Image (tube, helix red, strand yellow):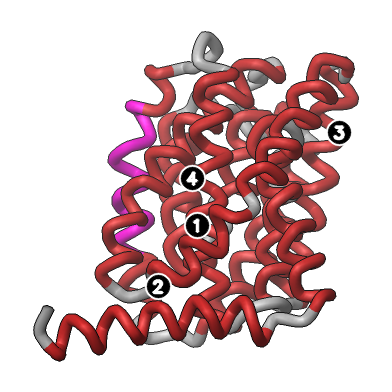
Amino acid sequence: MDRAAQARDDYQVNQFSEIWVSLPLWGWGLAAVAAFLVGFSKTGIGNVALLAVAAMAATLPAKESTGAVLVMYLVADLVAIWVYRQHVEWKMIASLILPVLVGLAIGAVFLAWVSDLALKRTIGVIVLILLVMGLRPDKLKAERRIVRYGYGSLSGFTTMVANSGGPAFSLYLLASRFDKMRFLGTSAWFFFAVNATKLPISITLGIIRPSNALFALIFTPIILAGTWLGVWLVKRLNQKLFDGLVMAFVAVAGLYLLLG
């Protein structure tokens, strides 16, 4: 092995060791809570994952946190797409590909001009406005092309600039009158595709490295426990309560982005 390769390997080992050694007990606890919430959000009530993002951000540096959360997302995504594999609206996902890509492109451009904090607060305002509009379903017809393209573009934009595409997508599915199983199945496959697309980009940018990837994978049993609770809870929720909880956590997500 040449010196460069040895130095690279030593650096990776040191980075991983640094997480193990320097993270206090409360940090491990917060990371465990984040892992559980990630799992729960993917099979239960969406948008709870933003609380997991906040918990991880308080535990690790920004880049390490972002990469670790993405790895956790992918683990939970795999469970969700398996559990809800028979409840997917492929036609809807296909219809959103173009507007989502447009949103991703716009988000990439905006990142070069606007601060991250300003973008998050702007997204928070937009999400809360959409939430209020969603309370009047007669005013927001999801089958209209302009509405579908608007939500699709916003989902792509928000996931690009703030890793927060969930609220806009959730509101669109509610506006489309999706029952809870179709809601979860379509969301699972949509965000698995989005996160899988982000994976090679994140590795290239150094957001995901062996250190934080292994750190995230340590919590796989806790992620799985969260997915189990999500499945258990959804089976016991009636449609009206499910919709209400989704709306409530959309509001929490909007406020988090606005005030965070």
Label 4 belongs to which residue?
74
Q: Is residue 232 above or below residue 164?
A: above
Q: Which residue is mark 2?
A: 207
Sequence-wise first label, 4 or 2: 4
Residue 110 position by quadrant:
bottom left
Amino acid type indicated by mark 1: Leu
Q: Amino acid at mark 2?
A: Ile
The percent position of residue 21, horizontal first and vertical second, equals 65, 83
Name the spot of residue 29 as percent of width and height, x first. Answer: 81, 66
Tell me which label, 3 or 1, sits earlier in the chain: 1
Q: Amino acid at mark 3?
A: Gly
**Left or right of residue 5: residue 141:** right
Quadrant including the C terminus: bottom right
| SS assignment for the magenta stretch, majority | helix
Residue 45: image location, x then y, percent: 75, 36
- The residue sitting at the top extreme is 86
The magenta segment is 94-106
Q: Which residue is mark 3?
A: 244
Q: CA distance from mark 3 to mark 4?
A: 26 Å
Is 167 left or right of 250, judged from the image as shown? left
Q: Residues within 10 Å of mark 2 (few under 14, many from 20)?
A: many
Whether 97 is among the magenta residues is yes
Q: Nearer the viewer, mark 3 or mark 4?
A: 4
Query: Marks 2/3: CA distance?
Result: 35 Å
Q: CA distance from mark 1 to mark 2?
A: 9 Å
Q: Earlier in the sequence, mark 3 or mark 4?
A: 4
Cα–Cα span, label 3 and label 1: 27 Å
